[in-house]
Image: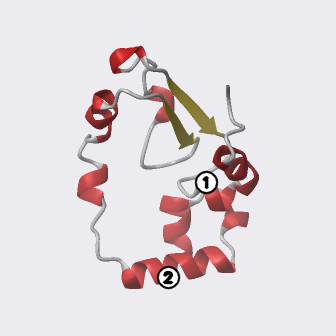
């Protein structure tokens, strides 16, 4: 479980605590959805392109499921803004690994 957390979910060894291990363990036991085919499908870009409202993309610097630094900035349909925030020092589980940043995101304090 520890190896899987560091390989897929978390960037920092220090973030692999008892809570992270419990969440990972319960997730493995109770999952029913196979996310890999969906996450690798490339469906996100067309879905975002079809959406006409403003969006804030929040990515982790060390998320192995995405490459936010390689994504292009471009306006969305209707000229709506698409903003991107890359959270440094975090992996896929930003909410666990960087809770202060996560709270700022939740309360709308990241970016303008």
Q: Residue at x 38, y 83 (%)?
A: 30
Q: Residue at x 48, y 34 (%)?
A: 68
Whole-percent x, y for residue 97 in the image: 67, 58
Q: Pointer 2: what residue?
A: 25
Mark 2: few/some/many CA within 10 Å (<14, 14-19, 20+): few
Whether 94 is drawn above or below 14: the answer is above
Whole-percent x, y for residue 64 in the image: 46, 49
- Residue 58 placement: quadrant: top right
Whole-percent x, y for residue 11 in the image: 61, 55
Q: Residue at x 38, y 20 (%)?
A: 76
Q: Pointer 1: what residue?
A: 94
- Residue 34 placement: quadrant: bottom left
The disc, 2 or 1, on the residue closer to the chain's N-terminal end is 2
Q: Secondary structure at mark 1?
A: helix
Of the pair 72 and 111, the residue shown nearer to us = 111
Q: Secondary structure at mark 2?
A: helix
Whole-percent x, y for residue 95 in the image: 63, 58
Q: Are marks 2 and 1 in contact (CB under 8 Å)?
A: no
* Image position of 93 (left or right of 34): right
- Residue 84 placement: quadrant: top right
């Amino acid at each position: 479980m520890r190896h899987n957390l560091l390989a897929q979910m978390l960037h920092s060894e220090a973030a692999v605590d008892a809570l992270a291990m419990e969440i990972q363990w319960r997730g493995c036991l109770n999952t029913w959805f196979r996310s890999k085919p969906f996450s690798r499908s490339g469906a996100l870009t067309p879905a975002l392109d079809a959406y006409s409202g403003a969006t804030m993309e929040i990515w982790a610097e060390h998320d192995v499921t995405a490459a936010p630094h390689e994504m292009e900035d471009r306006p969305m349909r209707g000229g709506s803004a698409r903003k991107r925030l890359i959270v440094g020092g975090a992996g896929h589980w930003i909410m666990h690994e960087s809770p202060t940043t996560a709270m700022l995101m939740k309360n709308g304090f990241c970016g303008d």
